[in-house]
Image (tube, rainbow, N blue to C red):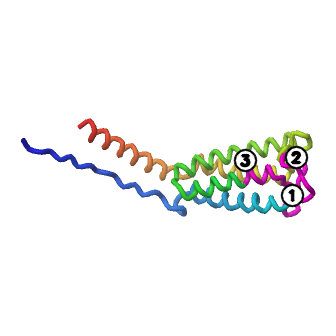
Amino acid sequence: MPTVYEEETELAVKEPGITASPNRGLALTAGLVLAVWGILGFFFAGEGGHAFFGRDGGLLWDAFQVNPALCLLWTLLAAAMLIGGLGTTIGSRNLNLTAGVVLVVLALYGVVFVNTSANVFALNTADNVFNAIVGFVLLVTALGADRENLRALRAARDDQDALHAQAVHG
Protein backbone atom coordinates (compact mmCIF):
# COMPACT_ATOMS: atom_id res chain seq x y z
CA MET A 1 0.00 0.00 0.00
CA PRO A 2 1.52 3.34 -0.98
CA THR A 3 2.27 5.88 1.72
CA VAL A 4 0.63 9.21 1.27
CA TYR A 5 2.54 12.24 2.43
CA GLU A 6 0.51 15.31 3.08
CA GLU A 7 2.32 18.48 2.46
CA GLU A 8 1.64 21.23 4.93
CA THR A 9 1.57 24.59 3.32
CA GLU A 10 1.92 27.72 5.37
CA LEU A 11 1.23 31.09 3.95
CA ALA A 12 3.78 33.65 4.88
CA VAL A 13 2.14 36.86 5.95
CA LYS A 14 4.41 39.80 6.30
CA GLU A 15 3.43 42.08 9.12
CA PRO A 16 3.56 45.70 7.93
CA GLY A 17 6.50 47.65 9.30
CA ILE A 18 6.14 50.51 11.73
CA THR A 19 6.28 53.10 8.94
CA ALA A 20 3.76 51.16 6.82
CA SER A 21 1.22 50.83 9.61
CA PRO A 22 -0.34 54.05 10.93
CA ASN A 23 -1.60 52.24 14.03
CA ARG A 24 1.82 50.86 14.95
CA GLY A 25 3.53 54.20 14.31
CA LEU A 26 0.95 56.14 16.29
CA ALA A 27 1.06 53.68 19.19
CA LEU A 28 4.81 54.24 19.47
CA THR A 29 4.55 58.01 19.05
CA ALA A 30 1.67 58.49 21.49
CA GLY A 31 3.33 56.04 23.88
CA LEU A 32 6.51 58.10 23.84
CA VAL A 33 4.61 61.35 24.46
CA LEU A 34 2.60 59.81 27.31
CA ALA A 35 5.81 58.37 28.79
CA VAL A 36 7.44 61.81 28.81
CA TRP A 37 4.35 63.42 30.35
CA GLY A 38 3.92 60.65 32.91
CA ILE A 39 7.55 60.29 34.00
CA LEU A 40 8.27 64.02 34.14
CA GLY A 41 4.95 64.55 35.87
CA PHE A 42 6.08 62.41 38.81
CA PHE A 43 8.80 64.96 39.54
CA PHE A 44 6.30 67.82 39.64
CA ALA A 45 3.43 65.91 41.25
CA GLY A 46 5.35 65.54 44.49
CA GLU A 47 5.98 69.26 44.89
CA GLY A 48 3.95 70.56 47.79
CA GLY A 49 3.06 67.12 49.14
CA HIS A 50 0.01 66.52 46.96
CA ALA A 51 -2.10 63.45 47.67
CA PHE A 52 -1.94 60.45 45.32
CA PHE A 53 -5.64 60.92 44.51
CA GLY A 54 -6.23 64.61 45.07
CA ARG A 55 -7.76 67.52 43.26
CA ASP A 56 -4.55 69.55 43.55
CA GLY A 57 -1.23 68.78 41.97
CA GLY A 58 2.03 70.21 40.75
CA LEU A 59 2.37 72.00 37.43
CA LEU A 60 4.18 70.34 34.54
CA TRP A 61 5.53 73.00 32.13
CA ASP A 62 3.39 75.58 33.96
CA ALA A 63 0.30 74.22 32.21
CA PHE A 64 -0.56 70.62 33.09
CA GLN A 65 -1.72 69.99 36.64
CA VAL A 66 -0.49 66.56 37.70
CA ASN A 67 -0.80 64.31 40.70
CA PRO A 68 0.74 60.84 41.13
CA ALA A 69 -2.48 59.06 40.05
CA LEU A 70 -2.60 60.89 36.70
CA CYS A 71 1.13 60.32 36.14
CA LEU A 72 0.71 56.62 36.86
CA LEU A 73 -2.21 56.36 34.44
CA TRP A 74 -0.23 58.12 31.67
CA THR A 75 2.83 55.94 32.36
CA LEU A 76 0.83 52.70 32.29
CA LEU A 77 -0.85 53.71 29.03
CA ALA A 78 2.57 54.64 27.63
CA ALA A 79 4.08 51.28 28.54
CA ALA A 80 1.18 49.39 26.97
CA MET A 81 1.33 51.49 23.81
CA LEU A 82 5.10 51.17 23.41
CA ILE A 83 4.88 47.40 23.77
CA GLY A 84 1.85 47.23 21.46
CA GLY A 85 3.48 49.44 18.84
CA LEU A 86 6.33 46.96 18.60
CA GLY A 87 3.81 44.12 18.23
CA THR A 88 1.27 43.48 15.51
CA THR A 89 -0.91 45.82 13.49
CA ILE A 90 -4.10 44.26 14.85
CA GLY A 91 -2.82 44.51 18.43
CA SER A 92 -1.76 48.14 17.91
CA ARG A 93 -5.16 48.97 16.47
CA ASN A 94 -6.98 47.43 19.45
CA LEU A 95 -4.64 49.15 21.87
CA ASN A 96 -5.10 52.53 20.16
CA LEU A 97 -8.85 52.05 20.35
CA THR A 98 -8.74 51.19 24.05
CA ALA A 99 -6.30 53.96 24.99
CA GLY A 100 -8.29 56.45 22.91
CA VAL A 101 -11.48 55.60 24.77
CA VAL A 102 -9.69 55.86 28.15
CA LEU A 103 -8.24 59.29 27.30
CA VAL A 104 -11.49 60.69 25.89
CA VAL A 105 -13.40 59.45 28.95
CA LEU A 106 -10.70 60.98 31.17
CA ALA A 107 -11.06 64.31 29.34
CA LEU A 108 -14.84 64.24 29.76
CA TYR A 109 -14.42 63.30 33.42
CA GLY A 110 -12.12 66.29 33.85
CA VAL A 111 -14.55 68.67 32.20
CA VAL A 112 -17.44 67.50 34.38
CA PHE A 113 -15.56 67.33 37.70
CA VAL A 114 -12.87 70.01 37.25
CA ASN A 115 -13.78 72.11 40.30
CA THR A 116 -15.14 69.40 42.56
CA SER A 117 -13.73 67.02 45.15
CA ALA A 118 -14.38 64.19 42.65
CA ASN A 119 -11.47 65.47 40.52
CA VAL A 120 -9.14 62.77 41.86
CA PHE A 121 -6.72 63.10 38.92
CA ALA A 122 -6.14 66.86 39.50
CA LEU A 123 -7.27 67.58 35.94
CA ASN A 124 -7.28 71.13 34.62
CA THR A 125 -8.15 72.59 31.21
CA ALA A 126 -4.73 71.85 29.70
CA ASP A 127 -4.95 68.22 30.85
CA ASN A 128 -8.45 67.89 29.44
CA VAL A 129 -7.48 69.34 26.06
CA PHE A 130 -4.36 67.14 25.88
CA ASN A 131 -6.30 63.99 26.81
CA ALA A 132 -9.12 64.81 24.39
CA ILE A 133 -6.80 65.50 21.43
CA VAL A 134 -4.58 62.46 21.95
CA GLY A 135 -7.61 60.24 22.61
CA PHE A 136 -9.45 61.52 19.53
CA VAL A 137 -6.40 60.98 17.27
CA LEU A 138 -5.99 57.45 18.66
CA LEU A 139 -9.67 56.66 18.07
CA VAL A 140 -9.75 58.05 14.53
CA THR A 141 -6.59 56.18 13.60
CA ALA A 142 -7.79 52.92 15.16
CA LEU A 143 -11.13 53.12 13.37
CA GLY A 144 -9.97 54.48 10.03
CA ALA A 145 -6.38 53.52 9.26
CA ASP A 146 -4.72 50.26 8.25
CA ARG A 147 -7.83 48.92 6.53
CA GLU A 148 -5.86 47.34 3.70
CA ASN A 149 -3.26 45.92 6.08
CA LEU A 150 -5.90 44.51 8.41
CA ARG A 151 -7.91 43.03 5.53
CA ALA A 152 -4.79 41.28 4.15
CA LEU A 153 -3.77 39.97 7.58
CA ARG A 154 -7.25 38.62 8.32
CA ALA A 155 -7.53 37.00 4.87
CA ALA A 156 -4.16 35.30 5.30
CA ARG A 157 -5.14 34.09 8.76
CA ASP A 158 -8.40 32.69 7.36
CA ASP A 159 -6.47 30.95 4.57
CA GLN A 160 -4.12 29.41 7.13
CA ASP A 161 -7.08 28.21 9.20
CA ALA A 162 -8.71 26.67 6.11
CA LEU A 163 -5.49 24.87 5.13
CA HIS A 164 -5.08 23.58 8.67
CA ALA A 165 -8.67 22.34 8.78
CA GLN A 166 -8.25 20.66 5.40
CA ALA A 167 -5.05 18.93 6.53
CA VAL A 168 -6.68 17.71 9.76
CA HIS A 169 -9.91 16.49 8.18
CA GLY A 170 -8.27 15.30 4.98
Q: What amino acid is at disc 3?
A: Leu
In the rendered structure, find residue 146 and report the number of the disc placed on it. none
- Earlier in the chain: of badge 1 and badge 2, it is 1
The C terminus lies in quadrant? top left
Q: Toward the viewer: 1 or 34?
A: 1
Amino acid type for the residue under numbered disc 1: Gly
Say which of 142 and 163 sits in front. 163
Q: Is residue 91 left or right of residue 81?
A: left
Crowd band around label 3 with a 10 angstrom C-alpha radius: few (<14), some (14–19), many (20+):
many
Secondary structure at badge 2 equals loop
Across and down, in percent, residue 2 comes to: 8, 44
Segment tinted magenta in the rendering? 47-74
Mark 2 Cα shell of 10 Å, populated few (<14), some (14-19), many (≥20): some
Please name the residue that numbered disc 3 is placed on: 103
Left/right placement of residue 146 relative to residue 164 reads: right
Q: Report how far apart the C-alphas of labels 1 and 2 lie in the structure.
A: 12 Å
On the question of residue 169 being in view, the answer is: yes
Where residue 95 appears, as percent x and y from the top left, is: 60, 48
Please give the name of the residue rendered at 67% of the width and 55% of the height, measured from the top-left corner.
78
Per the image, the residue denoted by label 2 is 54
